[in-house]
Image (cartoon, rainbow, N blue to C red):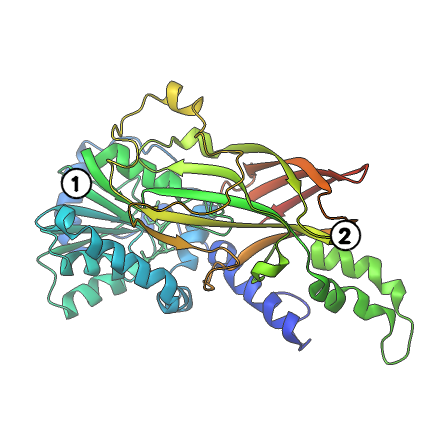
Amino acid sequence: MYSNMGYSNGHHQQQERVTTHRDRVRRGGRRSRESLRVSEHQQQQQQQQQQTERKPTTPCTDFDVAYFHSYAHVGIHEEMIKDRVRTDTYRAAIMQHQSSIEGKVVVDVGCGTGILSIFCAQAGAKRVYAVDASDIAVQASEVVKANNLSDKVIVLHGRVEDVEIDEEVDVIISEWMGYMLLYESMLGSVITARDRWLKRGGLILPSTATLYMAPVTHPDRYGESIDFWRNVYGIDMSAMMSLAKQCAFEEPCVETIMGENVLTWPHVVKHVDCYSVQIEELESITTSFNFKSMMRAPLHGFAFWFDVEFSGPAISTINNHVPSVIASSNNHPMDGFQKKKRANPNETLVLSTAPEDPPTHWQQTLIYFYDPIEVEQDQQIEGSVILSQSKENARFMNIHLEYASGGRSFVKESVMR
Ligand SMILES: C[S@@+](CC[C@H](N)C(=O)[O-])C[C@H]1O[C@@H](n2cnc3c(N)ncnc32)[C@H](O)[C@@H]1O
């Protein structure tokens, strides 16, 4: 909990929301892996499996246990479900792909309350495996029962890495995206599900994801947090400014900005094709950028956001078993490019968290500089960013940012935890 809880202005509300969001990953007690329960329906099956139990691909760490524990809280699910941009887009995508779902077997990776599994059942799925390692799976089971869908939706209370499904599946659905897309590192579990169960030519929703970054100006934010100290009730408190900068801008901030805060077209940090992406590709992502500011403004930092698309395997990579050697050296051609306008000739559904689009609970992630840089129109802003999974906890993200403009260069290290 932030120590400034008693402080009440608009910014405090943002800070409070940041805390709540990050609690998604770090809140919660410890629970031993052995205590992960399996729904009654699956107990018999599990006992048989234990005799021939395979080694889990990834160990379940204490951090994972805390992570799953955080998802047992109703508040997180309420927030996600109330995010209508998110939930309506998923439902629309399921309905758009109804012909690929009807009569088919689906796995919902991280089902939470079961909402996406139920949408799939409503779209006519023959069977849906709703998998979640969090205790929220208990409620998902009850929700499924209350909606008379127990014959179709099978809730598996366990990790995707550990549970057993004795058939291939036609469809994978998952809402796995974290802040800055890759925070939480849940995409690895979708890849595991894909490689364990998806039929060749099967459908993955969403099918692609793209992380963007762009330089931003945000004088109001800087004013509220830093310039505020210049004159407090007539007292010169500018001696506080250095501490205020450290406290406000040391870590990435999750907050909503507007299109007008963005100084250039965004740069594609990473494009992910869910049909072919490999787990190793996500451990560390490096990109170099070279922006030209479209206006004269104080540059306060960089914003990151993402979008995901819901298209079939035909539009994306058809072969879902790409050898890792090829895939890991095979950056998508979109990586490193500046994206000007979304070309969407196929009417592919897009869930966007961009500043110019309707707000979502992901908001945008901002990395602020301690001091703004005055940039002229057309001035170059160049540098590089490395996003890497933290060694301490792979669900956290280390951000190494190097940037230069107007002959000055800087380095900023931060951790999203
Ligand atoms: C972002 S929530 C989405 C919940 C639900 N699908 C929805 O859309 O409302 C992600 C869920 O995935 C679960 N999860 C994450 N990694 C998992 C894994 N490896 N195995 C099983 N469940 C996982 C979490 O416990 C959490 O409930």
**Under tag 1, what secondary structure?**
strand
Residue 169 has which mark?
1
Q: Residue 262: x and y, percent?
A: 61, 54
Q: Residue at x 82, y 36 (%)?
A: 407
Give the spatial CA distance, label 2 vs label 1: 49 Å
Residue 353 has which mark?
none
Q: Residue at x 13, y 44 (%)?
A: 45
Residue in the foreground of this view, choosing between 65 and 13? 13
Q: Quadrant of residue 312?
A: top left
Q: Residue at x 33, y 21 (%)?
A: 323
Q: Is residue 89 left or right of residue 292?
A: left
**Vertical position of residue 237 compared to residue 403: above or below:** below
Please, which residue is most extreme toward the bottom here?
233
Q: Amino acid at mark 1?
A: Val
Q: Residue 5: x and y, percent?
A: 64, 72
Residue denoted by label 2? 370
Q: Residue 210: x and y, percent?
A: 44, 43
How packed mark 2 is, by other alpha carbons closer than 10 Å (few <14, some 14-19, many 20 or more), is many
Q: Is residue 37 left or right of residue 104?
A: right
Quadrant in which the N terminus appears: bottom right
Q: Residue 348: x and y, percent?
A: 30, 48
